[in-house]
């Protein structure tokens, strides 16, 4: 049985209700099975961990304690995807997985199965080092304790694993230990498998970075990151969630590509779905089996009656992060293949914007302009990257910077700093080509020199400050979304702008106002989108005057 194909068939038929992200992932996995490339699907390797679970791992708690585990279809599809895709040497494709699922869906059991499989079966010739990691030791021990109970209830596993107070050791000299961020033993690790639990509570990425660095000597390491949603923002949860979104968008044409990362995200597609029982399985794939549906009904009814905190319900039972930075635009909203070839030699007024950096981020500039009796807004953009950043970040960012440079969508500044004179020169080029800046918007932070130079060149009244808060940007953000959704904005299918628009993330305050968030990963840059947003903000402020000019 091919569990991936079976799961996809159940999803396609409507028998199983899943969120859009899960649908996209299993469409992609099914396509890869039918169209193998560097990696192909190996039925035996995909089935092997399932057989291990159902023949050797027992339920440790509840009324079924002691009985062998019977995996559900969604679990079988997940495990066979994680372990079944390999290259011609048998090396696994996926090295890192993000599994987000609401509480009480058997997440700890799955983590324990994978940990024991990695300890005993995956590569027995290499003494495994497996770790369950969290910010607090009590949390890190949850998965380890579950694995220990599984071993105690299985005569077969007990013959191969010795459990001690703080770790367990296997027949092949492998070891499995719980670790916390305050552990004294984080140095000198040679991890082969790491389970990172409840990352929504991690306030920084240091523990993640330490564990990833510890795996560099392993031939096929595996990281399993699991969590429900949470309330801590700007940490590793937001970073990995953003990576998951970008990876999924990459399946259908997005710029970000990562063949080693598997995103499995069970969540409601919209906040309103918490009131719709038919949608609850989107965040709870084990609802009605592992998770008690009547208990969830009670929680929802209490939330409707204001007897229970809605935020906790949305976060823990429906995987909707609260006070979160969130991807602002879908790929469908951003994607626009339309191009234009407009003769500007007779001269047109335009409105500009720029977003500055000095070293690692991109610096970007944008011009928007309109043509008489044409409802469209046309966009020109340019972005700059330093030589040092290009060498350092191209592989990590997983986008084709050099290809974009050859296309003419990006330029390189020598050395390690952006030369703002290059940005001014670009505006000069556009003016020579007939696009005259009427207004130019900018974020005043760290832009005093650039702004002064631009004022001297284009006039004091041309430059307009765009404050980067909700008061200024909430309405322009919504306008940007609507204009992109309706394909009113045409940006010549510029790949850098398309990538940055997809990376644009927002936070929403208590009054429902939006503003761009700075809590974004370095590999998901939004600078070209911010330059366009600054230009659009200025356009909206001056719309009547500008529309009467061209």
Image: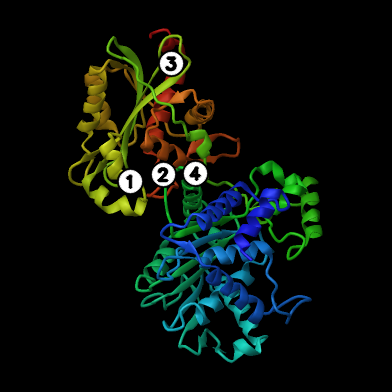
Tell me which label, 3 or 1, sits earlier in the chain.
Answer: 1
Q: Nearer the viewer, residue 484 or 304?
A: 484
Q: From the image, tell me which residue sits under label 2.
A: 255
Nearer the observer, 203 or 383: 383
What is the spatial separation of the Cα atoms under label 1 and label 4, in whole angstroms? 17 Å
Q: Is residue 529 above or below residue 159?
A: above
Query: Residue 6's mark?
Result: none
Q: Quadrant of residue 317?
A: bottom right
Asked if marks 1 and 2 touch (Cβ < 8 Å), the reply is: yes
Q: CA distance from mark 1 to mark 2?
A: 8 Å
Q: Which residue is mark 4?
A: 252
Between the residue at mark 3 and the residue at mark 1, the CA separation in whole angstroms equals 36 Å
Q: Which residue corresponds to the image point at 27% horizontal and 45% vertical from the top-left?
A: 359
Work out whether mark 1 precedes mark 4 in sequence or the reverse, and give the earlier one. 4
The local secondary structure at tag 2 comes to loop
CB under 8 Å between callouts 2 and 3? no
Residue 92 position (above or below residue 476): below
Tell me the residue that label 3 is attached to.
542
Query: Mark 1 touching mark 4, by CB under 8 A?
Result: no
- Percent x, y of residue 105: 68, 63
In the image, which is nearer the foreground, mark 3 or mark 1? Answer: 1
- Considering every residue shown, the one lying at the far left of the view is 414
Of labels 1 and 4, the one closer to you: 4
Instruction: Compute the Cα span from label 2 to label 4.
Output: 9 Å
Which label's residue is closer to the chain start, 1 or 2? 2
């Amino acid at each position: 049985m091919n569990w991936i194909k079976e799961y996809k068939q159940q999803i396609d038929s409507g028998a199983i209700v899943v969120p859009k992200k899960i649908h996209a992932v299993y469409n992609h996995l099914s396509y890869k099975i039918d169209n193998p490339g560097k990696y192909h699907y190996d039925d035996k390797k995909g089935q092997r961990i399932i057989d291990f679970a159902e023949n050797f791992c027992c339920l440790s708690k509840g009324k079924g304690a002691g009985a062998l585990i019977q995996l559900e279809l969604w679990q079988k599809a997940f495990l066979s995807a994680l372990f079944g895709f390999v290259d011609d040497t048998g090396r696994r494709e996926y090295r890192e997985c993000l599994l987000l699922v609401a509480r009480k869906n058997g997440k700890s059991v799955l983590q324990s199965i994978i940990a024991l499989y990695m300890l005993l079966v995956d590569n027995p010739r290499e003494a495994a080092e497996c770790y369950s990691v969290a910010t607090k030791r009590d949390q890190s021990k949850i998965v380890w304790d579950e694995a220990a109970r599984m071993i105690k209830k299985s005569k077969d596993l007990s013959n191969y694993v010795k459990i001690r107070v703080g770790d367990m050791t296997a027949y092949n000299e492998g070891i499995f230990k719980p670790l916390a961020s305050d552990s004294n033993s984080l140095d000198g690790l040679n991890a082969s498998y790491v389970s990172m639990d409840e990352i929504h509570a991690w306030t920084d990425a240091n523990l993640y970075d330490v564990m990833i660095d510890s795996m560099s000597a392993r031939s096929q390491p595996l990281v399993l990151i699991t969590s429900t949603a949470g309330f801590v923002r700007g940490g590793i949860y937001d970073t990995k969630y953003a990576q998951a979104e970008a990876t999924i968008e990459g399946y259908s044409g997005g710029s970000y590509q990562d063949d080693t990362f598997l995103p499995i995200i069970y969540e409601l597609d919209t906040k309103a779905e918490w009131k719709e029982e038919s949608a609850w399985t989107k965040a709870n794939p084990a609802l009605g089996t592992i998770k008690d549906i009547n208990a969830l009904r009670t929680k929802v009814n209490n939330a409707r009656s204001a007897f229970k905190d809605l935020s906790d319900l949305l976060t823990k039972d429906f995987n909707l992060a609260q006070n979160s930075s969130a991807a602002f635009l879908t790929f469908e909203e951003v994607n626009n293949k339309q191009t234009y070839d407009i003769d500007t030699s007779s001269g047109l007024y335009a409105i500009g914007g720029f977003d500055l950096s000095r070293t690692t981020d991109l610096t970007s500039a944008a011009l928007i302009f309109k043509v008489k009796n044409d409802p469209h807004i046309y966009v020109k953009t340019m972005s700059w990257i330093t030589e040092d950043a290009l060498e350092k970040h191209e592989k990590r960012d997983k986008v084709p910077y050099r290809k974009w440079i050859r296309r003419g969508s990006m330029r390189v500044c020598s050395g390690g700093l952006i030369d703002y004179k290059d940005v001014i020169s670009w505006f000069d080029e556009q003016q020579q080509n007939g696009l005259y800046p009427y207004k130019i918007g900018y974020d005043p932070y760290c832009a005093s020199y650039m702004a002064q130079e631009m004022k001297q060149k284009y006039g004091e009244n041309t430059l307009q400050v765009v404050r980067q808060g909700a008061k200024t940007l909430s309405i322009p953000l919504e306008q940007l979304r609507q204009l992109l959704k309706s394909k009113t904005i045409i940006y010549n299918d510029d790949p850098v702008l398309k990538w940055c628009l997809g990376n644009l993330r927002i936070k929403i305050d208590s009054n429902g106002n939006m503003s761009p968030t700075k809590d974004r990963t370095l590999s998901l840059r939004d600078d070209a989108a911010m330059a366009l947003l600054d230009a659009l903000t200025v356009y909206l402020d001056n719309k009547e005057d500008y529309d009467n000019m061209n």
